[in-house]
Amino acid sequence: MAEPNWVDKTIWTQDNLPVMRGMNSESVDLIYLDPPFNSNADYAAPIGSKAAGAAFKDTWSLQDIDIAWLDLIETKHREVARVIAAAMSKSNMSYLIYMSVRMLEMKRILKPTGSVYLHCDPTMNHSLKLLMDAIFGANNFRNDIIWQRRYGRAKGSQHLPKTWGTHNDNLLFYAGGTSVRVRPFRQISLDEAKQRFPKTDERGRLYTTIAHFSGRAMGDRPNLCYTWRGFTNPHPSGWRVSKERLEQEYQDGKVIIKADGRLERRRYFDPEVGVRTGNLWTDIAPPSGDELTDYPTQKPLALLDRIIRASSNEGDMVLDPFCGCATSMVAADRLARRWVGIDISPKAVELVVERVKADQGMFKKIVPRTDIPLRTDLGPIAIYNSLANKRHLYGEQEGHCNGCREHFPMKILEVDHIIAENQGGTHHLQNLQLLCANCNRIKGDRGQEYLIARLEQRSTKHFWKK
Ligand SMILES: C[S@@+](CC[C@H](N)C(=O)[O-])C[C@H]1O[C@@H](n2cnc3c(N)ncnc32)[C@H](O)[C@@H]1O
Ligand SMILES: [Zn+2]
């Protein structure tokens, strides 16, 4: 894992794609992203390089830049390309391309011990889930958290005669690797604690009783049938837990043999830890009062507080690549995490400076940046057609030309930029491929889609040429 190549409390006013491309691999512990939804809404800020500087209306359509990115995805990430191919409209396809190039960078910069929360809503939730599965791995999917964001009027209330009211956003939570742990707890008031833990023990601690035997509905579970300290399970579904665990709970004072000879198994309330939360979050209200900025899509601090507490430790690096009015930065700062935010809108940097300073005092050093960072974890970038690059790509493509798919000896194949340099393509291996001389001539300095279209004229159509 690499060190971040930026300092704590950095805020970029930039498109997050080139910034993330310049960030070191495996250098971030937690990513929260709240991207624009593909929702026909107006956003104050521009999206992507084309619309930069203009007020942006959320109209997604395929542009040259999409096709160039799709080339890269098609060539290097086939499973992602399959998800994009399944999009139901050009607008959705364009949105998914926009998201996938960014998610691929997020995957690269996230540590295997890190976590990512994608904030979205039912508009594109289903497609984004497939994209996240393809990029972060379906086996790293942990939860679809439902946040009830509105108590009163539903979203899109003008549609109410035709639909049920929509009150939720979704947070898709993925772990960077299988060992990642989460602490899904929340603090509760004493009143709520007393309701949920209605009994008091000899030492005044709150607890509630829980079952020690399993119900019959659980079916037969022979490995949980045993006799412990003279108690035997009454039916074949057995005890709730193994004999060892039961004995441990007894030693810990959580299983009691009462004076009348009956068993009591207890769950205690721990005020330090709070109570376990599930994936339905109904207790976080939208921002209001002092917390409100004039940022249209502002999220509540309590939401970010919960995510950051659950999935990071003090000193960890938290990234929000669509940070808006920097809610996650303020929450991270309060919880003594390091942080970096990116937003294309200059309004964001103004707000974060204002908010974090108001929160913590003037002495905290915020670093505003607009440049593109240079990765420090790569060493010098090899000349693009170096022998080392050629060898690597030859192995990756198993000796096939990436156009016609014919097999060739290495010396016949030529190194080609997938996204042309004049369109912002880099010399990184990620943007390079090997083509045979013939395919390279056909392609010239056009995009990969031109080559593929030419090669496939006689066979099936390429999926985006609908
Ligand atoms: C839904 S808002 C995020 C709101 C944020 N969570 C908050 O609490 O304020 C989406 C943000 O993404 C920003 N954005 C859109 N495209 C971007 C891009 N390509 N790079 C960086 N930021 C972008 C917009 O300026 C907007 O602030
Ligand atoms: Zn070829």
Image (tube, rainbow, N blue to C red):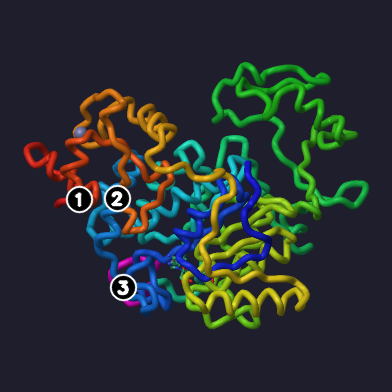
Camera-side residue: 75 or 318?
A: 75
Whole-percent x, y for residue 396 in the image? 38, 30
| Residue 157 forms part of the magenta stretch | yes
Measure the alpha-carbon separation of dots 3 and 1: 32 Å
Q: Name the amino acid type tagged 3.
A: His
Write down the region rendered in magenta. 156-166
Eye-nearest disc, 3 or 1:
1
Whole-percent x, y for residue 235 in the image? 63, 22
Residue drawn at the location 54% of the way across and 30% of the way down = 217
Camera-side residue: 330 or 428?
A: 428
Eye-nearest disc, 2 or 3:
2
Whole-percent x, y for residue 23 in the image? 55, 53
Label 2, on which residue? 70
Measure the alpha-carbon separation of dots 1 and 2: 9 Å
- Mark 2 surroundings within 10 Å by alpha-carbon count, few (fewer than 14), some (14 through 19), many (20 or more): many
Measure the alpha-carbon separation of dots 2 and 3: 34 Å
Would residue 388 be visible to someone looking at this image?
Answer: yes
- Mark 3 surroundings within 10 Å by alpha-carbon count, few (fewer than 14), some (14 through 19), many (20 or more): few
Tell me, yes or no, whether the two marked residues, 2 and 3, touch with CB atoms within 8 Å: no
The residue tagged with tag 1: helix, strand or loop?
loop
Label 3, on which residue? 159
The residue tagged with tag 3: helix, strand or loop?
helix
Is 98 left or right of 228, judged from the image as shown? left
| Residue 116 forms part of the magenta stretch | no
Is 350 left or right of 213, judged from the image as shown? left
